[in-house]
Amino acid sequence: MSQPSWREYRPGAAFPGVIGRTAEESRPAWPQPLRATPGAPNVMFIVLDDTGYGQLGCYGGPIATPNLDSLAQGGLLYNNMHTTALCSPSRSCIITGRNHHANGMAGVTEMSTGFPGYNGQIPFENGFVSEMLLQHGYNTYMVGKWHLMPSEQESAAGPYDRWPLGRGFERFYGFLGGDTSQWYPELVYDNHQIEPPATAEQGYHLTPDLVDKAMAFVADAKQVAPDKPFFLNLSTGATHAPHHVPKEWADRYRGRFDEGWDAYREAAFARQKELGVAPADARLSRHDPDVPEWDSLSPEARRLAARMMEVYAGFLSHTDHHIGRLLAFLKEIGEFDNTLIMVVSDNGASPEGGVTGTANEAQFFNNAPEPLEDSLRSIDELGGPTTFNHYPWGWTWAGNTPFRRWKRETYRGGASDPFLVHWPSGIRARGEIRTQYAHLVDMVPTVLEALGIEPPSTIRGVTQAPLHGVSFAHTFDDADAPSNHHTQYFEMIGHRAIDHDGWRAVCPWPGPSFAEAGRPFGTPITVQDLTDLDAHHWELYHVDEDFAETRDLAAGQRDKLVEMVALWYVEAGKYDVLPIDGSAVQRMMTQRPQITEARTSYTFRPGTQSLPSAVTPRVLNRPHSVTVDVDLAAGAEGVLVCQGTDAGGWTLFVKDGRLHYTHNYVRRALYRLTGADPVPEGRHELRFEFEPTGQPDIQHGKGTPGKAQLYIDRQLAAETDLPVTTPVMFNPGGLTCGRNPGSAVDPDYTSPFPFTGTLHSVTVDLSGELITDMNSEMRMHMARQ
């Protein structure tokens, strides 16, 4: 007999077929799969990290970025896009279409406190665009940097509901935290850690790996469902520190920055006017008081600073090259024209390299900078696997041309960034500039309008909050269209601003700069401070006529200023911005309920994942012991346990039959201890102990001195005095049992140097008072944004 007719129905709806006693008298119906609208465009976000307004070639910068420039030439360049001035908050706006405080992301998640706008956990009622598009038949891929969940949840203990696969992404490949080595990254594939597929010595670098995986994700699905659209969020580690790039890319810029940062700014500003990226009547902002005059530097300091910028430029060009590979792939598979691409940076260029820059970021965070002569000895290694480098903040300031200041501050240097839109099938305009006001919260509404999708009322049964952004899709083919985004507040660690219809009010921290403030960054703002700030320290700019905030009109237009300040408080009330909290140290050190009660004993086993630094036992500046239960066969060797990398850390290992301990003091010194006699074969207890013998001098980069001892079966095998230890942090700071992934903490062995005997367990025991320099810890966390 003929096959009965059938039809489709939505899962959860009433079954529309017929169920009889037998299949013969029944009529089937099939659950209807989610299908995108035929011909629906793909969507791709490319999110750069710490890339300033004046660095890309299409924004007047001297760095070659031909592939990103081609997107500007074939699409639209926006010169009035705004970010939050910090990493995680900006990324939360990009992915949800809601303001960062409403996302619980007042700062990076490491700074979370117990207030709604500050708790570091994006509410599920603020759905991600990945979750929205998943409901419309899209494949969804997250590749690269995440940094959108509490760092203490990055371990194998979870919870996993705020990992990428818990927020609407079907596939993930990248890293969960704020930064990572480009040569030896801390990689996660879907919901588990992995090691990079090759080593730096074999030519591995993170950026091409991320692009390879992005292309593979798309290709995997397209060969099965060629008409199914995708959403890809590619968030590069570049150009956040460490500035890691193959040497040949940095060498392309030899001598290009020898004239210094002032010359960079003047040339970039002139080019911006030629391109129309800056208005013809714009004025260049003043020389920053925190940046030394280039000519005031010694010839050696200028040579080092210039090389650091060459490395950064090579890093950005290298990134652009691999983005070009992705664009070429989309063309090859016939998807380029029908892919809506948006390119943005998460904030302005970064000042975490300090006034001189650093060959090893960990030195800066530990208050242990290298003398100039030591840095010069590393000049040919900058950008390579043995460094963790970041440029001086003179280049930061130049990179944000024509604006003042930088990341973390709500002046335009921190909060105005490059933004490109490219979609040949959907936008007729080519190579045009758009001047309408926009903010990162506008990206999701624009995508939804372009796709003809209404914001969902629910996601997985959770009623959704309204979007805060507004679409700028009406500007795609109309350069003269009005701006629909009229008002936008800013708040970052107490630094505040408000934009409204071409006017901008800014309230910096007490004092106009680090140099002039007389108080360190992140100092709490008291009630009296706030009263004084609101009464006397707001600045006013008519940015419709003063693009780079060069003329403060506060004194002459007091009524307008009062109106703007009042508007800031209205917006603050809407979006959970209050209470205003200018502290950083205290927020870093806040005890959060999702962290288990402080422990004094941790047990680790081989074959397990590395521990992210946020959940490792804190051994610095306190007595501690490491006890290993091990079976040694003849010739067994390898790492028993280690924390950190060649940029700094500690390692306990067996080599040449003997037990060894090494403390790597921020790459400046290796303090080693070796057992006098070989470890006998068989099962043994091997132990390391550290007993403080003095107090730390954290201000001068010196952790607690102490006595280091090795024991075999509780018999002393060796001891020595450690004159100095790492005072604040290891970065990267993961802890691993049974091997040393990434770069070797001690160059006496080759990573990963896995232990070849039988390792039963490693127990780290802590005792005594934790001694912490909170200011330095804050600086470390902020640099991982």
Image (spheres, grey):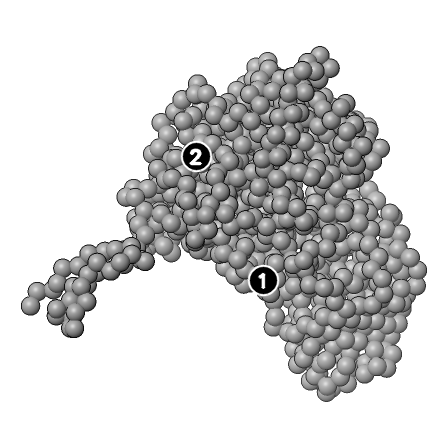
Residue 118 is left or right of residue 678, and the answer is left
- Residue sitting nearer the eye, 382 or 157: 157
Query: Residue 548 sits in which quadrant?
Result: top right
Q: Is residue 525 above or below residue 161?
A: above
Q: Tell me the number on the disc at residue 646.
A: none
Query: Is residue 105 in view?
Result: yes
Question: In this rendering, would 230 be left or right of 668?
Answer: left
What's the residue type where badge 2 is placed? Answer: Thr
Left or right placement of residue 520 versus residue 579 in this view: right
Amino acid type, label 1: Gly
The crowding category of the residue bearing disc 1, from other C-alpha atoms within 10 Å (few below 14, some 14 to 19, many at least 20), is few
For disc 1, the marked residue is 158
Which x, y percent locates residue 445? Answer: 44, 36
The image quadrant where one finds the C terminus is top right
Whether residues under marks 2 and 1 lie with C-beta atoms below 8 angstroms apart, the answer is: no
Closer-to-camera residue (627/558): 558
Residue under numbered circle 2: 446
User: Callout 2: few (<14), some (14-19), or many (20+) C-alpha neighbours within 10 Å?
Assistant: some
Evaluate whether residue 53 shows in this view: no
